[in-house]
Image: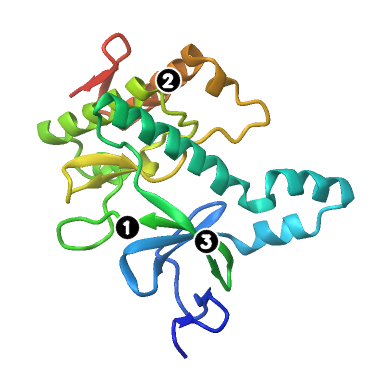
């Protein structure tokens, strides 16, 4: 059977294995598109939403159920991209596209970030645990941090596992953890709060050792 069922418009993922898993989503290679990935909501999350009561379903109708996260991330991506274009800055978030139908529900299309050999890009977490940063990596990481602050990107889950090394484009880039998913997105409304949160999360990366965060210059040293 073809990977793409043209009669229904569904992309079939059955029989395939995710290339990555998170608490909420699974990540897949997109059939027929080697440079793209698909992010789907994990089955237990979709089932949980489907079993909610009348009041819960009413809220889900407004927030798009388990797929509300796609809307939130798309809005954050668009706002960040717009600011980057205006300020002539590199985009700190991996490219995302539209949505496709799959046998695992709606899937968000994303850019597949790889190393120079074509394998999945290494996370900042992995690099810090394995060998730490060299001077070139440090430069790229500080450029990444600089851009996030300059465009005031809303990244409530700025962890090293959500940042990968894009060797094809000599940069670090965010692949997850962006977009304010709280009911009251206060950090979206109040810039100083968001800036403080960014600084605090970068400072948390000092736990790996070998990195020192300087809040006054918004940069790392090694």
Is residue 41 in sight in this rendering? Answer: yes
Q: Where is residue 175 shown, x and y percent of the image?
A: 38, 46
Q: Residue furthest top?
A: 216
Left or right, 174 with reference to 219: right
Q: Helix or strand or loop: what does disc 1 sit on? A: loop
Q: Which residue is mark 2?
A: 200
Q: Position of residue 196 (x, y in %)?
A: 45, 15
Say few, some or many: other residues with alpha carbon within 10 Å of mark 2 (under 14 / 14 to 19 / 20 or more): some
54 relative to 28 in the view: left or right: right
Label 3 environment density (alpha carbons within 10 Å; few <14, some 14–19, many ≥20): many
Any mark on residue 150, and which?
none
Question: Which quadrant is home to the C terminus?
Answer: top left
Seen at 47% across and 12% down, the residue is 192
Q: Residue at x 40, y 32 (%)?
A: 80
Q: Position of residue 3 (x, y in %)?
A: 44, 82
Q: Which residue is mark 1?
A: 112
Residue 187 vs residue 201: left or right? right
Q: Earlier in the sequence, mark 3 or mark 1?
A: 3
| Colouring rule applied to residues | rainbow
Picture residue at 33% right of the left edge, 20% below the top = 150
Counting from the top left corner in percent of width and height, residue 141 is at 23, 32
Tell me the distance, in whole angstroms, between the alpha carbons under discs 2 and 1.
28 Å
Q: Is residue 20 above or below residue 173?
A: below
Q: Estimate how packed mark 1 is, as few (under 14), some (14 to 19) or many (20 or more) residues with alpha carbons within 10 Å.
A: many
In the picture shown, does residue 154 fall above or below 197? below
Tell me where residue 44 sits by quadrant.
Answer: bottom right
In front: mark 2 or mark 1?
1
In the rendered image, the vertical position of residue 18 relative to residue 144, given as above or below: below
- Where is 68 relative to 160, above or below? below
> On the image, numbered disc 3 is attached to which residue?
107
Labels 2 and 3: the sequence-earlier one:
3
């Amino acid at each position: 059977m073809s990977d793409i069922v043209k009669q229904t418009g569904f992309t079939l993922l059955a029989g395939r294995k995710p290339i990555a898993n998170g608490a909420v989503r699974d990540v897949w290679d997109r059939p027929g598109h080697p440079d793209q990935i698909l992010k789907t909501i994990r089955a237990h999350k979709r089932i949980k939403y489907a079993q909610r009561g009348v009041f819960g379903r009413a809220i889900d109708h407004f927030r798009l159920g388990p797929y509300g996260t796609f809307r939130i991330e798309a809005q954050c991506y668009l706002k960040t991209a717009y600011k980057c274009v205006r300020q002539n800055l590199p985009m700190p978030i991996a490219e995302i596209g539209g949505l496709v139908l799959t046998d695992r529900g709606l899937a968000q299309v994303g850019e597949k970030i790889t190393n120079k050999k074509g394998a999945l890009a290494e996370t900042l977490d992995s690099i810090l645990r394995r060998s730490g940063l060299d001077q070139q990596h440090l430069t790229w990481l500080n450029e990444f941090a600089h851009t996030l602050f300059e465009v005031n990107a809303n990244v409530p889950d700025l962890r090293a596992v959500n940042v990968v090394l894009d060797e094809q484009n000599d940069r670090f880039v965010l692949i997850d953890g962006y977009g304010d998913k709280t009911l009251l997105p206060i950090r979206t409304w109040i810039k100083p709060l968001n800036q403080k949160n960014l600084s605090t999360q970068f400072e948390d990366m000092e736990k790996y050792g070998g990195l020192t965060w300087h809040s006054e210059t918004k940069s790392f040293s090694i």
